Amino acid sequence: MTISNPINALLLDIEGTTTPIDFVYKVLFPYARAHVGDYLANNPASTNVKEDIAALVELNKEDVRCGLEPPRVDGSVEDISLNRVVAYLHWLMDRDSKATPLKSIQGRIWEAGYKSGDLMSQVFEDVPRAFERWKQQRRSIYIYSSGSVLAQKLLFSATQFGDLTQHIADYFDTNIGPKRNSESYGRISQAIAVPAPSILFVSDVNDELDAARPAGLETRLCIRPGNHPQPTTSNHKAIRSFEEIT
């Protein structure tokens, strides 16, 4: 499948694009859910934990204002019940929330899991070959995921094919902006100093591609085994393997 513009950078989603959805939903998410209580209890003095809980308190207030009826998280960071925080985090997980403090906490739980050997990540078999090919072609590879930058680095450092981080130039998460917001892709283009038409964004979610297109990026809809069905009227060319990107 040919591309209309000369591509200097590949911007890749993770879930359903480089990595099977089942690994995310059946391995990573359950692992974080099972360990979140212990993680918070064992790291009460951590600056990162305090900052994440403070952000969760503000997020909780917004959810309450919106009438979503979340488990309430009230009070100062120092006085909040740990059980209330865990209940709210579980509620966010059940909603598949992309909230930054949730993703931050999940990332550090997974970090401990990778270090202990409990976790090894998975990527599709065409991914390492494509990374090597694009590297030889002097095309830079970037990752953009709702998961934290830490979680992204951990995933690519511990795959069944070994450490793939040597191929990746940089990582972006929701701190750059939501993935369904066109402005996010403009910010990424500026951050990597590559004109938007020379960036190819590959994702399994049509709405994300719809956001990237107005920013000027080339797009491809990635169809992998186990992915959620996307609109049949998608305006984005579909691929089933990175081998189709030529």
Image (cartoon, helix red, strand yellow):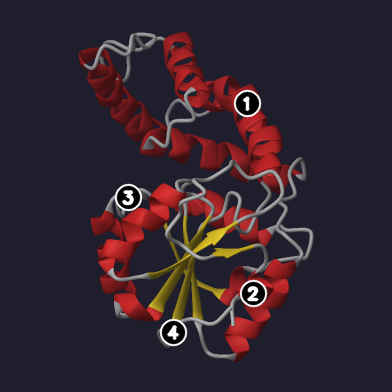
* Disc 2 versus disc 3: nearer the observer: 2
Q: CA distance from mark 2 to mark 3?
A: 31 Å
Query: Which of marks 2 and 1 precedes in the sequence?
Result: 1
The residue sitting at 48% across, 49% down in the picture is 205
- Are the residues flagged by discs 4 and 2 in contact, CB closer than 8 Å? no
Are there few (<14), some (14-19), or many (20+) residues within 10 Å of tag 4? some
Residue that badge 1 annotates: 35
Q: Residue 246 sits in which quadrant?
A: bottom right
Amino acid type of the residue that numbered disc 4 sits on in the rendered structure: Asn
Amino acid type of the residue that numbered disc 1 sits on in the rendered structure: His
Relative to 123, residue 2 above or below:
below
Query: Which of marks 3 and 2 precedes in the sequence?
Result: 3
Tag 3 secondary structure: loop
Query: Which of marks 3 and 1 precedes in the sequence?
Result: 1
Residue 92 percent coordinates (x, y): 45, 23
Relative to 128, residue 101 above or below:
above
Residue that badge 4 annotates: 8
Residue situated furthest bottom in the rendering: 137
Horizontal relation, residue 104 to residue 222: left or right: left
Q: CA distance from mark 4 to mark 2?
A: 17 Å
Tag 2 secondary structure: helix
